[in-house]
Image (spheres, rainbow, N blue to C red):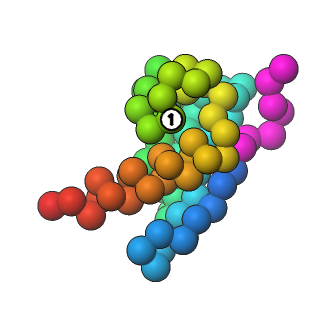
Amino acid sequence: MLRTEPRRVTAQIDDKVVSAEYSEQTGQLCVRQDGALLREWFPPHSWMAIASVAGARHWGTRPTDDDLIALLRNEMTLMRTP
């Protein structure tokens, strides 16, 4: 059964408040910092972004909160890298 509300997680990483929101209905994945959109993906790219940090569980289509936190940590690491 698909979730009707997007899954949302928020974390503080490197003194920044970041959040991830994933909609199972559309596959849209958004990463925000202080409410500003940093990244946005749609299928299949959103699924690949999730699967790259979470492994093959659910093929990236049904991430857990832990999967989205891992995605946030990964994205913040990539943004720090020059």
From this view, report whether residue 59 is shown above or below residue 20. above
Q: Quadrant location of residue 53? A: top left
Q: In which quarter of the image is the N terminus?
A: top right
Is 4 or 73 nearer to us in this picture?
Answer: 73
- Residue at 44 percent of width and 26 percent of height: 48
- Residue 25 relative to residue 75: left or right: right
- Residue 63 relative to residue 38: left or right: right
Residue 21 coordinates in the image, percent (x, y): 63, 47
Residue 67 coordinates in the image, percent (x, y): 57, 42
- Residue at 72 percent of width and 26 percent of height: 25
Residue 80 coordinates in the image, percent (x, y): 27, 64
Q: Quadrant of the C terminus?
A: bottom left
Q: Can residue 69 be seen in this view?
A: yes
Residue on which disc 1 sits? 54
Magenta-highlighted stretch: main secondary structure? Answer: loop
Is 46 or 67 nearer to us in this picture?
Answer: 67
Residue 27 is one of the magenta-drawn residues = no
Is 16 or 69 nearer to us in this picture?
Answer: 69
Residue range of the region highlighted in magenta in the rendering: 1-7
As shown in the figure, which amino acid type bears the numbered disc 1?
A: Ala
| Residue sticking out furthest to the bottom | 15
Q: How crowded is mark 1: few (under 14 residues within 10 Å), some or many (20 or more)?
A: many
- Residue at 39 percent of width and 51 percent of height: 74
Residue 45 coordinates in the image, percent (x, y): 43, 27
